[in-house]
Image: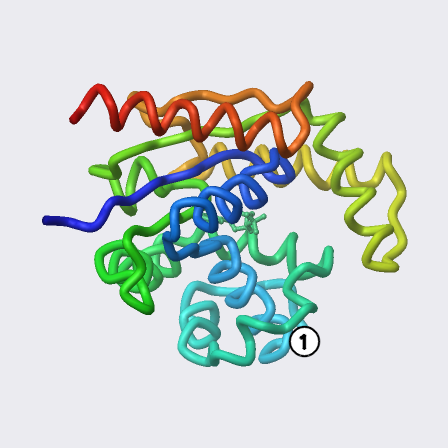
């Protein structure tokens, strides 16, 4: 028997992280935020090569290899500078390849013998776990996503200007969707959720209903 896997992909600030975390808690599954791996890589390039914006794949791979458990917990991973750099290193094929195994291992052997795994990211249902039991793709209007991100930043005590956040988000969406490897795209068999008019509770209920119905139809 293989461990059940739920793949959640989608755009930034679409609510996919909150949804993934809540589903994992509800089902007793382990949760992996795969964006953190790209953020940690971006963060490491900033600390190893502070004087340049010209990051080569080789430098990015050195950064991947320098990631430690402490890096993954660093609150700076959410900083805007790291966010933008993460999106740049995530477009590098060698970086994506270097991070595949870790993600697939998590899905196959979730930590602490959890009954299953929930992974969220951009390419989970298409590349990392194409055989996932359930695939959900989450999106929302970019203006609404920017407003959510501004709220998040202000709650963290960071400065946030809506127009700037919106522009950064559009740039990041474009980069994540147009890159040649593993671009952000919904898997053909994904359940598409538009959370523009949904709060976190509504998104959770909708997703759980989709999973339960599919489980019943497969039983
Ligand atoms: O989900 P996030 O905002 O924390 O992701 C950070 C960056 O990493 C984002 O620009 C997209 C990229 N990413 C990716 O390319 N593939 C993933 N599976 C997860 C994130």
Colouring convention used in this rendered image of the protein = rainbow
Whether residue 19 is situated above or below residue 111 in the rendered picture? above
Q: Where is residue 191? Give x, y as percent.
A: 39, 22
* Residue 52 placement: quadrant: bottom right
- Could you tell me which residue is drawn at 75 percent across and 42 percent down? 149
User: Relative to residue 209, is residue 214 drawn left or right?
Assistant: left
**Where residue 41 sits in the image (x, y, percent)?**
51, 66
In the rendered image, the quadrant that contains the C terminus is: top left
Q: Residue at x 61, y 57 (%)?
A: 85
The local secondary structure at tag 1 comes to loop
Q: Is residue 129 visible?
A: yes
Residue 181 in view of the camera: no
Q: Is residue 11 left or right of residue 122?
A: right
| Residue wearing tag 1 | 50
- Ligand 1 lies under 8 Å from the Cβ of mark 1: no
Position of 4 relative to 33 (above/below): above
Q: Position of residue 21 (x, y in %)?
A: 51, 48
Q: Residue at x 35, y 42 (%)?
A: 124
């Amino acid at each position: 028997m293989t461990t059940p896997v739920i793949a959640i992909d989608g755009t930034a600030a679409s609510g996919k992280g909150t949804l993934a975390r809540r589903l994992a808690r509800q089902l007793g599954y382990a949760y992996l935020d795969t964006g953190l791996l790209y953020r940690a890589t971006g963060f490491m390039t900033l600390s190893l090569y502070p004087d340049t914006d010209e990051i080569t794949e080789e430098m990015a791979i050195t950064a991947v290899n320098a990631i430690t458990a402490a890096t993954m917990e660093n609150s700076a991973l959410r900083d805007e500078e790291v966010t933008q750099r993460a999106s740049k290193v995530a477009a590098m094929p060698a970086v994506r390849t270097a991070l595949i195994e870790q993600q697939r291992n998590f899905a196959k052997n979730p930590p602490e013998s959890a009954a299953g795994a929930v992974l969220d990211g951009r390419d989970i249902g298409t590349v990392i776990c194409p055989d996932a039991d359930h695939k959900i793709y989450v999106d929302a209007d970019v203006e609404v996503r920017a407003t959510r991100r501004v709220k998040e930043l202000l709650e963290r005590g960071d400065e946030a200007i809506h127009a700037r956040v919106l522009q950064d988000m559009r740039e990041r969406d474009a980069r994540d969707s147009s890159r040649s490897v593993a671009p952000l795209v919904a898997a053909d068999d994904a359940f598409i959720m538009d959370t523009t008019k949904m709060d976190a509770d509504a998104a959770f209920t909708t997703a759980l209903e989709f999973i339960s119905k599919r489980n019943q139809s497969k039983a």
